[in-house]
Amino acid sequence: MALTTFSWCLGAALALLWGPSWPQVHSALAPENEVPLRPTTWLPEGKITSVTLPKGRTRRLYFTLKKKASAMSVTVSPCDLPIEWSLAARTLKDKPLKSLQWSTKKSVPEVWWQGPASEEKIHNFAGNTVDTYQGPSYPPASIYILRLRSKQQNTRATVFLHEGLGPSGIFPLLPSDPRVHTLGVGMTSVTLSWVPSASITSLPHTQNSYDYCVLVNSRQNYHSLCAAQQSMRKENNQKQEKKEKKRRVTVWPILKEWWWQQWDSFPEPQSSSPSSLTNEFADLQCACDGTESVCTVSDLLPDTQYYFDVFVIDRLNGTSSAYKGTFARTHEEARPAITTLREGELRWVTFHDRSSKSEQFFSFRPRGWQQSGLLTLQSCGGDEKVKVTVSSKGQVLTSQAVGGDLVHIWLQGSPSYLIHLEQEGITSGQIAAGRDPAIPGGLMASVKMQTSSAYHRRGVPSLPSTLQIKSFNRLRGCNSVTLAWMGTEERSLYCVYRRKLGNREAESTALTAPCLGPESRSDTERVLCKYFQELNPRRAVTTAVIGGLEPGMAYVFDVYLMRRWGIPVKYASKMVKTRKEC
C-alpha cells in the first residue's frame, strides 16, 4: 500500500513538471477586471485581522459600512517588511441581475467587479510603519476594497476596521513626543526615559492591563513589536538549522511549491482573539517591564552599540504601540596608563600597594629596520610573585614569571611591544605569619627592568654557568684575598666592589641586595674592572687579587658583569675575612 501511494505521488509530481500545460489560474498580464474564482475575503469591523502577504501578490479585503456610519478608520500594521496598501471605494452603476448563470459560482464582490462600476481611490501608503486612514465615509460606495502587497519577501500584516468618529480604543495611545531619551550611559549600563502613555496615566492603579516593554539588541531599531519578535524567531531558526542535517528532496516540496503559486492557496485572514495575542507576549525578554517610564538596562558589554525600543502593550486587547527607538554606545573600559620606555633606560618599577593585585603597562619601540630588542628583568621583592607578559598588536608573544634571577626576553619582528607587569598581592597568611617579603636594602622597587635595541645580535646574550664567587683560603692573607668567578665566551667587562663590615654587623644583613647594581655603589667601593673572554665555557674562569685590606677585618665582595645590552648581572655576594696574623 505504501509503495502504491509513493508511486502515485511520484507520478503526480512528474505530471506537474513535464506533463501538458495546466490552465493558469493567474497571469501577470491579466487585466484588472478578470478576477479568478476564489472565496470572498470580508474584513470584519472591530476585530484585529491578520493577513499573510506572499511576495509580489496583491491581497484584497472587502468591507461595507453601516448606513448610519458617517466616518471610519482603517489601521494597517506591517510586521517586519515594507508593504504597499491602498483603500478604494467602488460604486456599482447597475445592480447585477440574479438570472446570470454564473452568479451562483461567483462571489458577490467579483460580480460587482465585472459589472459596470466606478472606483475612487481614498488613501494609499507605502512603508514599514503603522499607518491609519481616518476620514468620512463615501456614501455612494457599494463596497470598499483594501489592497495589500509586499514586493520584497513573504510577510504578514494586521488590519483593523473601526466605524464611527473618535479613536477606536483598541491600540495604546502614544504621546505627542514618542521619542526614547537617553539619560545616562555607562560602561555596562544605559538609563532611558520616555514620556508616559496616556493609556497608562489615565487608568486607575487597580487596572494593570497596560505595560511597557523595553527590548535591547545590537542590530537595529524596530518599528513594531511584531518585527522584533520576527527577528528573534529568525535568529533562533538559524541556530537550529545549523544543527540539523540537510533534508532529502522529495516530491512533496515540489507539490507544495506549485500549490503555493496558486491563488486559491492563500491562507485566509484570521481574526485574532485577545487571548491568543496575549500569549504571543509571553516569550518577550523585556529588559524592563511595568508602568514606570524610566529604565536602566544593565549587564551590557563595554564599547558596544546597542539599540533600545520601547513598546506599550495592551494585554487585554492584545495590541501594542511602538515609541521611536534610540541607540547608544557604552563606554569603553578604562585603559591603564602606558609608560614609554626609552632606549637603554634602566627603570625601577614600584608597586605601591603590595597587599593587593596591581599591574603596570609599558611600551617599547626598537630602533633599526631589524625591529629587534632585548628586555631584561629582575625581581627585587623576595617572595613576591611578579609576571611579565609581552604582546604586539593584541597577540601575546610570551608570558613568564620574574624572580630573583635575571630574565632575558628577546624581541623581534614587531615595530612596537606592550609590556605588562602584574604583581600578585601578599596573602593574608604571609602577613599573619610575619613573612611580609620586605625589599632588602631599603629599596622601594619590586622589579628592575631595561629595554634596548639590538642592531646586530641574533639572540639573548649568554650568561655564566654559575653566579657564585669563590675565595681561596690558602691564598687569603692579612692584606689581600684572591677571588675567582665564571665568565662567558663573549668579551665583557667585570667590575669588583668591596665593602668593609663592622664588628656588630651580622652575616645575614651584610650581603648586598640582589637588585643593587653598580649605579647604587660609591666609586670608592670599586676595586677594579677588567675585560675577560673565553671561547670554551668550561674554562671560562677568571681570578682577581684584591689588595689594600686591613688585617682581621671582614669584607663583602660583589662582582658585576657589565654588558652593552641589558641589566648588569650581579654575582652572589661573598664575605671574606682577612687573617689577623701572617
Image (spheres, grey):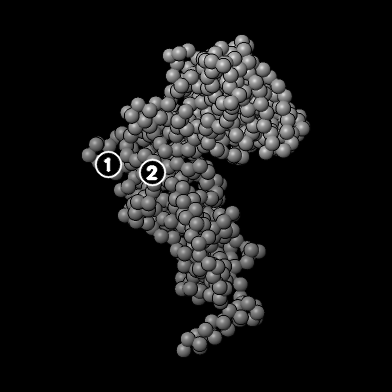
Q: Secondary structure at mark 1?
A: loop
* Along the line of sight, the residue nearer the viewer: 200 or 408: 408
* Numbered label attached to residue 559: none
| Mark 2 surroundings within 10 Å by alpha-carbon count, few (fewer than 14), some (14 through 19), many (20 or more) | some
Residue at image mark 2? 286
Residue 176 higher or lower than 60, as above or below: above
The picture places residue 370, in percent across and down from the top left corner, at 75, 34
- Res. 306 in view: yes
Q: Amino acid at mark 1?
A: Asn
Q: As rendered, which of 82 and 491 lies closer to the eye?
A: 491
**Image quadrant in which you'd find residue 520:** top right
Across and down, in percent, residue 18 comes to: 65, 79
Query: If you read the primary sequence from the N terminus, does the residue marked by circle 2 or circle 1 appear first?
Result: 1
The answer to whether mark 2 and mark 1 are in CB contact below 8 A is: no
Q: Is residue 355 left or right of residue 88?
A: left
Outermost residue toward the top in this view: 524
Task: Please indicate whether residue 283 sits to the left or right of residue 179 in the image.
Answer: left
Instruction: Give the vertical position of 11 relative to 493 (above or below).
Output: below
Task: State the image coordinates of residue 36 (x, y, percent, origin top left).
Answer: 55, 68
Task: State the residue at coordinates (47%, 32%).
Answer: 385
Point out which mark residue 208 bears: 1
Q: Is residue 151 above or below residue 445?
A: below
- Indicate the secondary structure of the residue bearing disc 2: loop
Residue ID at (63%, 29%): 485
Select label 2 or label 1 by which is in front. Answer: 2
Residue drawn at the location 59% of the way across and 54% of the way down: 151
